[in-house]
Image (cartoon, rainbow, N blue to C red):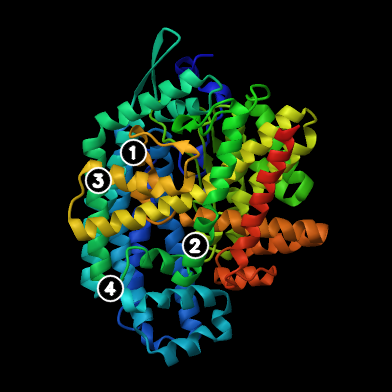
Amino acid sequence: MAAAEAAQTGGLAAGVCWDLSDLYASPDDPRIEADLAQAQAAAQRFAERHRGGVARLSADALALALTELEALGELAGRPASYAQLLFAADTSVPRHGALLQRVQERASEIRNTLVFFELEWVGLDDAVARALIEAPALATRRHFLESMRRYRPHVLAENEEQLIEDLANTGRRAFSRLFDELVAALRFQVTHAGETRELGEEEVLAHLYAPDRELRREAARALTQGLRSNARPLAFIFNTLVQDKAVDDRLRRFETPWASRHLANEIDAASVDALLAACTARYPLVARYYRLKARLLGLPRLEDFDRYAPIAEKGNTRSWDEARASVEAAYRDFSPELADVTSAFFRRRWIDAELREGKRGGAFCASTLPSVHPYVLLNYTGNQRDVMTLAHELGHGVHQSLAAPRGLFEQDTPLTLAETASVFGEMLVFRRLLREESDPEVRLALLCGKIEDAFATVFRQVAMTRFEQTLHAARRAEGELAIPRVNELWLEANRPMFGDSVALSDDYGWWWLYIPHFVHSPFYCYAYAFGELLVLALLRRYDEEGAAFVPRYLELLRAGGSDTPERLLSRVGLEIGDPGFWDGGLSLLEGLVAQAEALAGD
Ligand SMILES: [Zn+2]
């Protein structure tokens, strides 16, 4: 089926769309307004009772106040979750955008009413705070209370916090939304085999995985062309948000552009630097693999659009049902309990997988609220990578589901642990597919696919982090950046990774323009490298310990964000503070490349 036609009919996952009625019936559901109003009134009452008095609360009273806050957060979070999901499902409907905006504005009012609480808590003397944190009545709130206080040097006065919050709706958040709308509306003209088609971002990117080299070349050209012709507004958004961050960092006294992310991730700069350095030192492994890939494809050297070319043409497309069966079976092999959690996503329609115009690109799993359940969005085109994406997002889904009993404040982990269950799920599915496959050619293709995914998760994300580091530094030193300057920074960050193994064209210089992480969450990307290498270390534990590992792993997932990543991981025997830690996972990746070389040698 032609891709354009597939898009109209929903593609291979046609009809697989989520049911948001567990949140609300429709954007006009009167309960949306009712919940917002109730949350606002509850916030007001809470403020009347506690404003100016947090320092005088006993442990019991503080425990009660937190329970109230949590209930209030659930109430206010429901419309927010719904509006975000509705908008992601179809960004082109104006009332979806309008609802999102309305809900964000109301959420800001509520946040502003309550911000005093955090500021007063953070402002308490250490000794007083410590006594409360250690009180038995607050045992289940301990990490939440403790971790809030890490912002002590960075919070502002109440009226300043309120001002920033209000202005974000017409500033940072508005630009972020504009980016989503622009990218979702992009159309790329692909001319192939005498036919010209208009494709969305997801479909044009999917063609980079096509066996036909001319189609890949044309998809790359079309992608560049589409990005170039929209570069002005997109680059303007980038420049604005990078500067917005610089201002926020200045006001909040963060010394580097990445410091706030490290703090949010509950990780110190030294650990991240050790991760980045360990990965950068292994860049030659990337070149080694792409030289092998060039040989397998019969090319003297790869062009940038050859990076994702499939190694074998067969076994490349999977129906939605096949993908579902593979993923469920792989989870079941590992743990029936995990598999049961994933099954609910399919049965109860918590997944949106079909291709639709106006739908957001990429994939995500939204935890929504502990009292509801997570929702998964992906754009299923049927290649092996999409199967992995499904496994990945369901990994997030099981993690969030298992951690839901921790409640609103401790369900979600910092980003550093957020990619653990997702990448682990991918590895489970990969191993099962490899085990079931007897054809050596397809096995090699699977292995190469996994290597490429792992490289995309480790080395590519490290290169992206390097790019962001230089981008933010350049904006602070040089003022608003011209597009060619950003293109240059993008190429400079990517070239060392490929060495001479892949020719990066000037066209490739434009490809930073569509990457949402740079817009939505600066310095997110290293968390992927962190997650992948962590998972390789966990897999090694699993291989060593067998079934005994499973309950400990589930315990890690159930813990959610109830402690620092370092302490949670230490409970499963991983010491991320150890500077040599990252080399363990990187060596496993090298092993995969050696395995592919051996298979290719025959
Ligand atoms: Zn993820």
Identify residue for label 3. 485
Label ID, residue 277: 2
Query: Looking at the image, which residue is at 24% across and 66% down?
Result: 162
Distance between mark 3 and mark 4 Cα atoms? 28 Å
Q: CA distance from mark 1 to mark 2?
A: 24 Å
- Circle number at residue 253: 4
Provide the residue designation for mark 1. Answer: 509
Which comes sooner in the sequence, label 3 or label 4? 4
Q: Amino acid at mark 1?
A: Gly
Q: Secondary structure at mark 2?
A: helix
Q: Earlier in the sequence, mark 1 or mark 4?
A: 4
Which residue is at the front of the view, 444 or 370?
444
**Residue type, mark 4 in image:** Arg
- Examine the rendering and report whether any part of residue 182 can be seen: yes
Q: Are marks 1 and 4 in contact (CB under 8 Å)?
A: no
Q: Residue at x 57, y 23 (%)?
A: 12
Q: Give percent across and percent down for residue 347.
A: 65, 36
